[in-house]
Image (cartoon, helix red, strand yellow):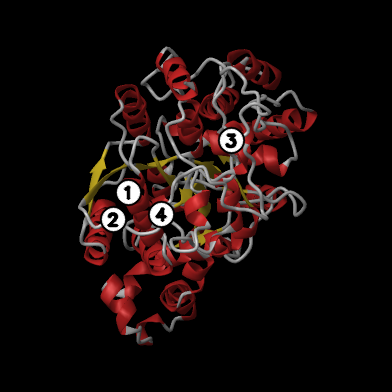
Amino acid sequence: MKKLLSLTLLLVSVVVLAGCATKTAPEEEIDCELYPNAIQCKVADPDNPQPGIVEVLDTLPAEDITIDFWHVYGQEKEALLLDYITEFEALYPNITVNATSQGGYDDLRNKTILAMSAGTTPTMLVAYPDHIAGYLEGDAVIPLDDFIYDDVWGIDITDFIDSYIEENRQYQGGFMYSVPYSKSTEMMVFNKTIFEANGITIPMDAPLSFTDLEGFMSTMVGTGADQCEYLINYDSSANLFINSVRQWDGGYTNSAGEILVDDENTVAMLTYLKSKFENKMIALPLAWDQQYGSTNFKAGDSCMTVGSTAGISYNIPDVGTFEIGIAPVPQWDEDHMSAVQQGPNVGIMENSTPAEQLAAWLFIKYITGTEQTAKWSMLTGYLPVRISGYESVAYQEFLSIAGMDAAGTLDDYVFSQDLQDLLGNPADYVYESMTANAAAVQVDYYEYDFAFSMVHASSSDARLQAGIITEAVYGGTVTVQEALQSMLDDLS
C-alpha cells in the first residue's frame, strides 16, 4: 500500500522538464513499532550490514535474462561501455545488457520519472545523488547493501574512495542506493608560457591560495603583451559559490533540505567574491557571453581557468599557441580545503525481478572493477572509483606520463605493451595525465552536495539558485544581501 501511495504522490507532483527538480508532497509517517520491517524503519548496522531488504539469489538463474541500462554517454564513451558489455556478456552468456543513451542528465531524469508513472523504468541507470533522492520519493530505486555484503556476490566496499561511499550512503537509513561510477572533480588550467614570461612558476602538485592569486594581479592582469584581461575564470558559477562556502566555513544546505545561506561567513565569502569580480581577478563565462570559459582562455583573455577534469580537452590550445599547466583548484586556507566531487553514480530500479536485479548488480560489479575503472578513467577523463584502480600498474604508469614530460624524458621512455595497447601512443596523453595528477592531490578533501528532494525545494534547485545569484552579483545587478535573500525567498 505504501508503495502505491508514494507513487501516486509522485505522479501528482509538479514535474518541470526544463531542468528543474521534482517536488513531492510529504508522505504519511510509518509507525515503526507496528511495521519494524518497513524500509523507513531500518537503519544500516555496521555489525549486520545485510539488512535483508532485497532478495539476493544464491545462484544466477540459467534462463536468459535481459537488463536495460539507461545512461547519458556520447559516442566515444558509449563505445567503451559497449566493449565492457561485450566482455561481460562473454562471462555471463545468458545475460543481455541493452544500453541506451537518453541524452543529457536532465533528459535521463525526466524520462525516468515518466517511466516510473508507467511502470516501465529500466533495470539500472546512471544518476546524480539528487536524482536518486527524487526516485526514492516514489520507492523506485532499491538499496544495494544486501548485494554489497553478500558472501557470494559482494564487493570490498573499503576499496572505494571514502568520500564516494559517503556520498552514496547519505540516503534514508544510511543505505547505499547507488554505487560510484563516473566521478570527476575540478582542476585549474593555467597559461604556463605567460606566467613563466613574468618569472612566475605555478606548482602543479599543490593548490595555490587566494593570497597567491592576489599577489599575481599587478603583474598578470592588464593590456600588456604578457598579460590577460582577467586572472582566473570559473566555468561553474554554482561550483564557485558552493566550494567557496565550504572553504570559508559558511552555510549552504544540509541533508534536511534547509537553506543555510543566511550566515555571516557566507555573506563574507560572497562579499569577497564581489570585490574580486570588480577588480578582474575572477571572471565568469558571463564576461564573454559564453557558457564555458575555455574558448576565451585559449584566446588569452584569462590567464587561468577552473573547470571539470572531464573537460580537459576543451582547454588545450592550438599547437604552438602556448604551453599549459594543470594544478589543483585554489584554496582559501589549509583549515577548510575543499574540491567539488562531481559525476554520476549507478543504481538499480525497483521495478525488476530478483534475477534482473542480480544480473544488474553483476554488471555494476564488473564496470566498477579495478581494471575497468582504471581503463574508464584513462580513456574518458573520469576518475577511478577504487583505490586499487589508482594503485594499479597501468594507472600508475599513466600518471607517470606527466612527470616524464616535465623531466624531458618522455620521448625516450618505453611504455609497457599493455598501456600501448590501451592508449595507442601514451605520449599523446600528457594533458590527461596532468589532469589525473591534479585530481589525485585533491582526493583527501573532496566534498559532495547533500542530496534532498523536499516540497519546498530540492538540492538541484539550491544548486541552480547558487549559480544564479553568483552571476547576478557578478553582473552588478544586486547587492550581496539582496542575492542571498533572493535565494532564500525562491527556495522557501
Q: Mark 2 falls on what kind of element?
A: loop
Q: Which amino acid does label 3 sit on?
A: Asn
- Residue in front for this viewpoint, 351 or 32: 32
Residue at the (40%, 33%) spot, across then down: 290
Q: Where is residue 394 in the image (x, y as percent from the top left)?
A: 41, 76
Q: Distance between the residues labelled 2 and 3?
A: 27 Å
Residue 376 seen in the current view: yes
Residue at the (61%, 23%) spot, across then down: 30
Q: Which residue, as the protein is rendered here, is positioned at the far front?
A: 34
| Label 4 Cα crowd, 10 Å radius (few <14 / some 14-19 / many 20+) | many
Q: Mark 4 falls on what kind of element?
A: helix
* 3 vs 1, front mark: 3
Q: Earlier in the sequence, mark 2 or mark 1?
A: 2
Q: In this view, does 379 lie to the left or right of 255?
A: left
Q: Earlier in the sequence, mark 4 or mark 3?
A: 3
Pointer 1: what residue? 355
Q: Quadrant of residue 138?
A: top left
- Residue in front for this viewpoint, 286 or 456: 456
Q: What residue type is labelled 2?
A: Pro
Q: Mark 3 falls on what kind of element?
A: loop
Q: Mark 1 falls on what kind of element?
A: helix
Q: What residue type is labelled 1?
A: Ala
Q: Distance between the residues labelled 2 and 1?
A: 7 Å
* 4 vs 1, front mark: 1
Location of residue 472 with respect to 123 vertically, above or below: above
Q: Position of residue 41 (x, y in %)?
A: 63, 33
Q: How far apart are marks 4 and 1 (CA)?
A: 40 Å
Pointer 4: what residue? 312
Query: Are circles 2 and 1 on residues that touch, CB within 8 Å?
Result: yes
| Label 2 Cα crowd, 10 Å radius (few <14 / some 14-19 / many 20+) | some
Pointer 3: what residue? 37
Q: Position of residue 68 (x, y in %)?
A: 26, 43
